[in-house]
């Protein structure tokens, strides 16, 4: 018997208790322990029922995802066969679910005959987020227990349900209070079943109710998720697997499920999504911050600035239950800011996502002030004022004077030098950058900017706060634009240059959205505002490297007052949410091309894609080489979660790994040669990219 599963008996009941920290992942040792224990209990005539539970808390977090990349998920005993044996047991098998039953963990529970869960348990099949489908019976057993519509929604969305919801849906039999001994509850339930001579249940004997659904149900479901799942491979295979459950006997349906699982696991999408899964876990491991570093206590938070960004940041902390002060020297602006926060909450409440009581609870945590003296007891202060160095330094000088010792002072800058801001204080070790993305109360990404003197315990503290406000923190170093905006610069530079050379906004946006971006570059700049792009470049002329054509088209649009959606005209013309071509853009592009000696020509879609993406990847390589990012996967997290890069491609660095670094290198060298002086200036391959490509390696080797 494996130590990963504890086998014991009590009277007529045998117990298989998973014992593999931290979440009882179904690696080979756990699978073997389950198999051995189940065989022992099945062969013991004194055993009349079997309880499957956990010895460490959570029931089971699912398969060991590391086995997918290693290929060891196919090592025997295989989960599908093991669960088939449990399902076919002649003795009742009861799952005792505490904490979570996800993926293979829920499939294990579904293979049991009965399920007892604590009230706070979460049950789900999140495999679709890893680019695969439930491959150990989930797509066949859940429709039999919960119904087709419920099962399909759970499987394709990957969203978990509560124990109470699971009981309503029919795949949990008993819910016990949180904190109650779920093993004891399952034991009592097993004894009741035995007293009643309740049968062992086999999913093979359970029908699937297809007749109660409309004939066009699956077609309509596909249509309803089409936009959201564009580019992903697994959702359609999930649907096909559930369709199979409707028409095939269990064993045949399981074979079909297995075929579809193997189709999914060998796709670029699965590799990309699993890459992001591991990237999120790696991002929490920050070089120079020891695991045992003690975080500072944070109970009170203050945000300086009541505009769109400041208000959004405030909402994050109110949502997480922090006492929060919003400070603005302008009382009228402060009042407007509070009004916007309340309005946002009321809109959410109207959608049924918050109750009126929850709205008032969150607003009750908010205090406002026009005096810095009112935030002297704050543990964390986040500045969100105008993006100008002298303004921010003045704020930090004041914070240094009024805030208590040990308070963390954070700047929400998106481009400015955090080291310079920190030097405006007498405590640079307490200063850090927290770059929220707009809208701050919605976007998940948080760039945590580590300055030269930032203390490790400050980093540890803000990572913990990020988790509490449900953000994805990625620690980066100080440079212009940090990681996200710095990588955005060459991407945007090439899109704008291609407009001068002959491309149109429509072509550029179409190519990028067909690749998978949520929005094309020209549409994105119109949304953010061309004025922001112009003013940022004026504040940082060094980014142009002396290129007189750099951003020339944006300059022309700015001079005309065509800032984008906010003015009704930018790269496109706007009427409400509808947009159409702006004929002035081509004229302005032709004029700028003539002024800068650029020959206009027909641009291929392939050139648009390569010239936008490959310099972005090249910049990522420079960032890695300089140590601004600790890992290539950190760059990917930032780009997927902050800039609309398709998750099913895994981020720019993973995409480069997938297509091969030599292809990126060859294309950069091609454009360097073809584009003359411009190519020499902008398409020089990063030394790291050249080294890895020459050695036949990829960015994972860094």
Image (cartoon, rainbow, N blue to C red):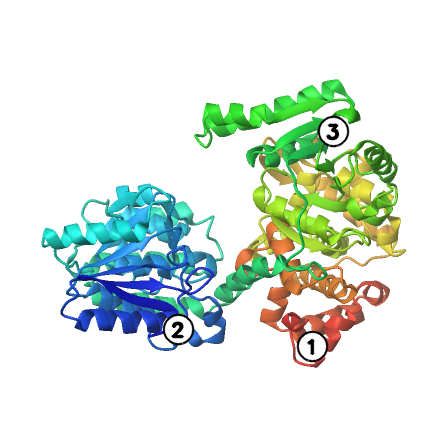
Judging by the rendered image, the residue that carries numbered circle 2 is: 29
* First along the sequence among labels 3 and 2: 2
Compared to residue 65, the image places residue 317 above or below, namely above
Compared to residue 143, the image places residue 45 above or below, namely below
**Foreground pick, 61 / 636:** 61
- Residue beneath the point at 46% across and 52% down: 229
Cα–Cα gap, marks 1 and 3: 52 Å
> Is any part of residue 428 visible from this angle?
yes
* First along the sequence among labels 1 and 3: 3
Question: Does dot 1 land on a helix, a strand or a loop?
Answer: helix
* First along the sequence among labels 1 and 2: 2
Judging by the rendered image, the residue that carries numbered circle 1 is: 693
Front: mark 1 or 3: 3
Residue 574 picture location, percent across and down = 63, 34
Cα–Cα gap, marks 1 and 2: 38 Å
Judging by the rendered image, the residue that carries numbered circle 3 is: 375
- Residue beneath the point at 51% across and 63% down: 274
């Amino acid at each position: 018997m494996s130590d990963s599963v504890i086998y014991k008996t009590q009277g007529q009941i045998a117990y298989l208790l998973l014992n593999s920290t931290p979440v009882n992942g179904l690696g080979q040792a756990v699978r073997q322990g389950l198999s051995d224990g189940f065989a022992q209990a099945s062969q013991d005539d004194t055993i009349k029922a079997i309880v499957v539970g956990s010895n460490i808390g959570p029931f089971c977090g699912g398969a060991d995802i590391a086995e997918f990349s290693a290929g060891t998920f196919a090592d025997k005993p295989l989960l599908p066969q093991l669960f088939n044996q449990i399902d076919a047991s002649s003795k009742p098998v009861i799952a005792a679910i505490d904490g979570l039953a996800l993926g293979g963990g829920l499939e294990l529970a579904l293979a049991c005959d009965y399920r007892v869960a604590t009230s706070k348990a979460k049950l789900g099949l999140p495999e679709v987020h890893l680019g695969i489908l439930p491959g150990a019976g989930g797509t066949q057993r859940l429709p039999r227990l919960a119904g087709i519509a419920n099962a399909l929604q759970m499987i394709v969305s990957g969203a978990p349900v509560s124990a109470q919801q699971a009981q309503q849906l029919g795949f949990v039999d008993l819910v016990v209070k949180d904190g109650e001994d779920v093993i004891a509850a399952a034991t009592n339930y097993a004894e009741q079943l035995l007293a009643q001579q309740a049968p062992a249940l086999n999913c093979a004997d359970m029908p699937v109710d297809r007749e109660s659904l409309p004939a066009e149900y699956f077609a309509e479901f596909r249509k309803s998720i089409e936009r959201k799942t564009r580019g992903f491979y697994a959702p359609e295979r999930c649907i096909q697997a559930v369709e199979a459950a409707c028409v095939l006997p269990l064993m045949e349906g399981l074979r079909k499920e297995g075929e579809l699982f193997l189709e999914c696991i060998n796709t670029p999408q699965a590799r990309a999504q699993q890459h992001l899964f591991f990237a999120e876990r790696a991002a929490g491991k920050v070089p120079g911050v020891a695991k045992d570093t003690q975080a500072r206590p944070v109970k009170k938070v203050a945000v300086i600035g009541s505009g769109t960004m400041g208000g959004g940041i405030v909402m994050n902390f109110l949502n997480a239950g922090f006492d929060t002060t919003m400070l603005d020297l302008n009382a009228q602006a402060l009042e407007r800011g509070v009004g916007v926060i309340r309005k946002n909450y009321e809109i959410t409440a109207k959608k049924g996502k918050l109750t009126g009581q929850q709205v008032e609870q969150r607003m009750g945590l908010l205090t406002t002030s026009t005096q810095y003296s009112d935030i002297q007891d704050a543990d964390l202060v986040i500045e969100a004022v105008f993006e100008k160095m002298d303004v921010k330094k003045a704020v930090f000088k004041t914070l240094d004077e009024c805030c208590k010792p040990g308070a963390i002072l954070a700047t929400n800058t998106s481009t400015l030098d955090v080291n310079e801001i920190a030097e405006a204080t007498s405590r640079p070790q307490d200063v850090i950058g927290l770059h929220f993305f707009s809208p701050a109360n919605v976007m998940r990404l948080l760039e945590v900017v580590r300055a030269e003197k930032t203390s490790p315990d400050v980093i540890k503290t803000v990572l913990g706060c990020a988790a509490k406000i449900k953000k994805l923190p990625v620690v980066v170093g100080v440079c212009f634009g940090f990681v996200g905006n710095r990588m955005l610069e060459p991407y945007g530079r090439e899109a704008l240059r291609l407009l001068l050379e002959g491309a149109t906004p429509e072509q550029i946006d179409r190519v990028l959205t067909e690749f998978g971006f949520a929005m094309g570059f020209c549409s994105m700049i119109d949304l953010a505002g061309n004025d922001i792009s112009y003013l940022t470049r004026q504040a940082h002329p060094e980014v142009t490297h002396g290129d007189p054509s750099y951003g020339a088209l944006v300059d022309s649009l700015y001079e005309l007052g065509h800032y984008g959606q906010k003015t009704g005209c930018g790269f496109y013309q706007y009427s409400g949410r509808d947009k159409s071509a702006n004929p002035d853009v081509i004229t302005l592009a032709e004029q700028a091309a003539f002024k800068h000696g650029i020959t206009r020509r027909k641009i291929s879609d392939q050139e648009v894609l390569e010239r936008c993406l490959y310099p972005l990847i090249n910049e990522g390589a420079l960032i890695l080489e300089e140590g601004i990012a600790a890992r290539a996967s950190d760059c990917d997290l930032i780009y997927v979660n902050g800039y609309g890069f398709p998750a099913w491609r895994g981020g720019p660095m993973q995409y480069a790994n997938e297509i091969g670094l030599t292809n990126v290198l060859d294309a950069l060298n091609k454009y360097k040669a073809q584009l003359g002086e411009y190519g020499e200036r902008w398409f020089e391959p990063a030394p790291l990219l050249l080294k890895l490509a020459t050695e036949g390696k990829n960015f994972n080797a860094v």
